[in-house]
């Protein structure tokens, strides 16, 4: 165990998953208030074909090239979701489900073809399904760190613009803020967070790292700023704890452990959160019932002088 902790490569991997968790927590808040939590799931699955096609084109596992392929595939998926919604009577959530299923099915088909080819099963592409941070080398880690830090910087630098875009788009448009530009930026930071996280968390579970921390943070505050900070903390801690536990075992996938710790934070928030947590609601209900309970103070009859 101590040899793992002292390994410089493990420390870099741990740092990358922590920063990734922070970025995912921040972007997840944007998706939560935009009411597009399912979008992260759809684009995560839609990125898989891009990873496999990029590998087939270059014939090696170059993380930067694979990330570019995943980003292109995810952006195509986002375009199809928007196109289906705007040109047909199909609703947005249905369009997301369609793109998710079709792209993921295509990705699994391509992955099967690659794994059956000569040397394909040694490519390590299976790690993109459930995530395997331990397989990342230092160059992979630096790529993840750099892109995740860019996402974090964009969210914090444009905090006021995000707040206007999410909560009062009409006022934002009135003061000259480009809603189309903000939507493009939102899509880009969402796709970037997804594609940098698929190797560590996997295409299936990256959505959980985006959704769960933000929902957990919502149980503690009504402030958008505080929710961003709390969601980032939950995401970062989930990344650290999940990576550490997966590194102890032999070949344990990173993604499921990260999601398990995120789920633990959610359960704690669901029960003890001061904003409509189960315990708080029960205590408020008990206090209200106690307040409304009629008081029985029967008046004692004075029997003096009564025959």
Image (tube, rainbow, N blue to C red):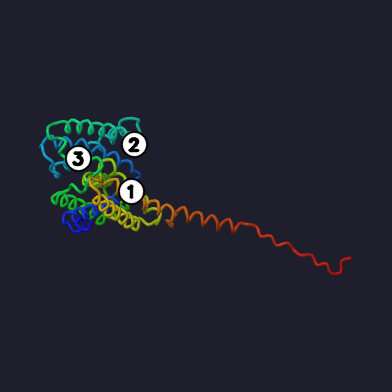
> Which of the 4 quarters of the picture holds residue 36?
top left
Disc 2 versus disc 3: distance between alpha carbons? 22 Å
Badge 3: how crowded within 10 Å, few (<14), some, or many (20+)? many
**Residue at image x 15%, y 39%?**
123
Q: Is residue 102 above or below residue 271?
A: above
Badge 2: how crowded within 10 Å, few (<14), some, or many (20+)? some
Where is residue 100? Give x, y as percent.
29, 35
Q: Name the residue tied to disc 3.
A: 70
Q: Quadrant of the C terminus?
A: bottom right
> In the drawing, does residue 43 fall left or right of residue 307?
left
Q: Is residue 191 above or below residue 161?
A: above
Where is residue 141? Give x, y as percent.
17, 51
2 vs 1, front mark: 1
Mark 2 lies on a secondary structure that is helix
Q: Name the residue tied to disc 1.
A: 260
Q: Is residue 120 above or below residue 201?
A: above
Q: Could you tell which of marks 2 and 3 lies nearer the N-terminus?
A: 3
- Is residue 173 at least partly visible in the picture? no
Q: Name the residue tied to disc 2.
A: 92
Q: Residue 84 shows which numbered tag?
A: none
**Residue at image x 35%, y 44%?**
35
Q: Nearer the viewer, residue 164 or 287?
A: 287
Mark 1 lies on a secondary structure that is helix
Q: Could you tell which of marks 3 and 1 lies nearer the N-terminus?
A: 3
2 vs 3, front mark: 3
> In the drawing, does residue 40 fall left or right of residue 306?
left
């Amino acid at each position: 165990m101590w040899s793992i902790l002292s390994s410089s490569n493990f420390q870099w991997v741990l740092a990358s998953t922590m920063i990734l968790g922070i970025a995912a927590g921040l972007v997840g808040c944007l998706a939560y208030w935009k009411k597009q939590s399912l979008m992260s799931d759809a684009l995560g699955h839609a990125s898989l074909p891009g990873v496999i096609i990029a590998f087939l084109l270059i014939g090696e596992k170059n993380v930067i090239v694979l990330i570019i392929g995943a980003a292109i595939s995810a952006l195509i998926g986002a375009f199809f979701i928007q196109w289906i919604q705007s040109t047909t009577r199909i609703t947005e959530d249905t369009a997301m489900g369609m793109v998710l299923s079709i792209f993921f099915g295509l990705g699994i088909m391509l992955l099967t073809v690659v794994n059956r080819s000569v040397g394909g099963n040694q490519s390590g592409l299976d790690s993109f399904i459930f995530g395997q941070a331990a397989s990342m080398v230092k160059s992979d880690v630096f790529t993840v760190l750099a892109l995740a830090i860019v996402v974090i910087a964009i969210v914090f630098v444009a905090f006021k613009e995000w707040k206007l875009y999410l909560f009062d788009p009409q006022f934002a448009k009135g003061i000259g803020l480009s809603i189309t530009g903000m939507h493009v930026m939102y899509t880009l930071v969402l796709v970037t967070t997804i594609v940098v996280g698929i190797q560590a968390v996997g295409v299936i579970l990256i959505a959980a790292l985006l959704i769960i921390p933000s929902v957990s943070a919502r149980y503690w505050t009504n402030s958008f700023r505080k929710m961003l900070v709390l969601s980032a903390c939950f995401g970062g801690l989930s990344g650290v704890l999940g990576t550490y536990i997966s590194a102890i075992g032999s070949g344990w996938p990173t993604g499921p452990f990260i999601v398990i710790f995120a789920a633990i934070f959610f359960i704690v928030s669901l029960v003890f959160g001061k904003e409509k947590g189960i315990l708080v609601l029960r205590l408020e209900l008990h206090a209200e019932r106690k307040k409304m309970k009629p008081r029985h103070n029967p008046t004692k009859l004075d029997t003096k002088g009564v025959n």
